[in-house]
Amino acid sequence: MLNGKTALITGTNRGIGHAILEKFAENKANIFAHARKETPDFIEKISRLSEKYNITITPLYFDLSDTTALKEEIKNKIFKTNQKIDVLVNTAGIAHGGFFQMTPISKIKEVFDINLFAQMEIIQLIMKVMMKNQKGSIINLASVLGIDITAGSCAYGVSKAAFIAFTKTLAAEYAKYNIRINAVAPGLIDTDMAKLMEAGAKERLLNQSAMHRLGKPDEVADLVLYLASDKSSFINGQIIRVDGGKA
Ligand SMILES: NC(=O)c1ccc[n+]([C@@H]2O[C@H](COP(=O)([O-])OP(=O)(O)OC[C@H]3O[C@@H](n4cnc5c(N)ncnc54)[C@H](OP(=O)(O)O)[C@@H]3O)[C@@H](O)[C@H]2O)c1
């Protein structure tokens, strides 16, 4: 489904981002695979995939909180070599739960830096390439917690709600350049993020899903693949839940 396309995916070393990396490789995209840092395990994973599917996977390394490193890496590996980017998937993110009075503003700012402002930096850079090519698809990893705002959501939930609002703004602004921007809002997905969640909050989320189970990273990756492909060419500005339906 992605033959001839080049994609940049963030947070590909584990979790949902890794499932998206595998799905895109299987569907023949050439990939810029972001990770926070280089590790033998990550190098082994991307080498194995590029060999298996006969595609190019170029690693990008930066911490999302380091704007200078982020800009440098994208400039050096994408701009300087005149690469095109057809698809951008903003997956990397952090979770945080807690009531407002128990949450230092510095923590809320940290969550916003990683879940919103870093994504804005990346999109602003990659949008230049997409506008030049007059086409592109951007997929943002939001969360059902950014839609069903509830107690304890002042950092993570509000950052994802802002990410959703930002997605809709971009979709309205860039449709004229043939660039589509959508968000995927997963429910509870079986990754490290869900494992680290407080037991009560986890149970509440499971109870809100009609299917009453954890989703698989691959089930999120399937939707991202569809949104990245030309099969979704008239879908723009949508926030699509992957949560087994509301109970
Ligand atoms: N799992 C769920 O239940 C769920 C539900 C709804 C939405 N989501 C969203 O889906 C996305 C992926 O979640 P996941 O479950 O796959 O999470 P995960 O397993 O915790 O993986 C998070 C990814 O983000 C990267 N990352 C975090 N902070 C970073 C930083 N400062 N700089 C660079 N990379 C950073 C991690 O890199 P390191 O390995 O270096 O830490 C890792 O690759 C997130 O945006 C999350 O909010 C997840």
Image (spheres, rainbow, N blue to C red):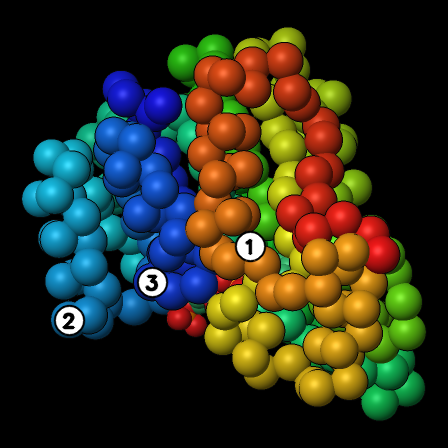
Residue at image location 67% in from the left, 23% down from the top: 236
The reply, left or right, for residue 151 in relation to residue 3 is right
Residue 127 in percent (x, y) is at 50, 29
Q: Is residue 55 left or right of residue 128?
A: left
In the rendered structure, the answer to whether residue 201 lies left or right of residue 58 reads right
Between 218 and 43, the residue placed more toward the observer is: 218
Name the residue beneath numbered marker 2: 40
Q: Residues within 10 Å of mark 2 (few under 14, many from 20)?
A: few
Viewer-closest of 86 and 195: 195
Q: Is residue 201 visible?
A: yes
**Residue at disc 1, CB closer than 8 Å to ligand 1:** yes
The residue beneath circle 1 is 118
Looking at the image, tell me whether mark 2 or mark 3 is earlier in sequence order.
3
Q: Nearer the viewer, mark 3 or mark 1?
A: 3
Lateral position of residue 199 relative to residue 58, left or right: right
Which class describes the residues within 10 Å of circle 1: few (<14), some (14-19), or many (20+)? many
If the image is split into quadrants, where does the N terminus sit? top left
Which residue is identified by label 3? Answer: 13
Residue at mark 2 to residue at mark 3: CA–CA distance? 11 Å
Residue lying at 59% horizontally and 73% vertically, measured from the top left: 194
Q: Please state, as top left, top right, bottom left or bottom right, where the C terminus lies in the image.
A: bottom right
> Where is 61 relative to 132, above or below?
below
Rendered image: mark on residue 84: none
Q: Nearer the viewer, residue 56 or 130?
A: 56
> Could you say whether the residue bearing mark 1 is in a helix, strand or loop?
helix
Q: Amino acid at mark 2?
A: Pro
Residue depicted at 77% across the width and 85% down the height: 200
Within 8 Å: ligand 1 and the Cβ of disc 3?
Answer: yes
* Quadrant housing residue 108: bottom right
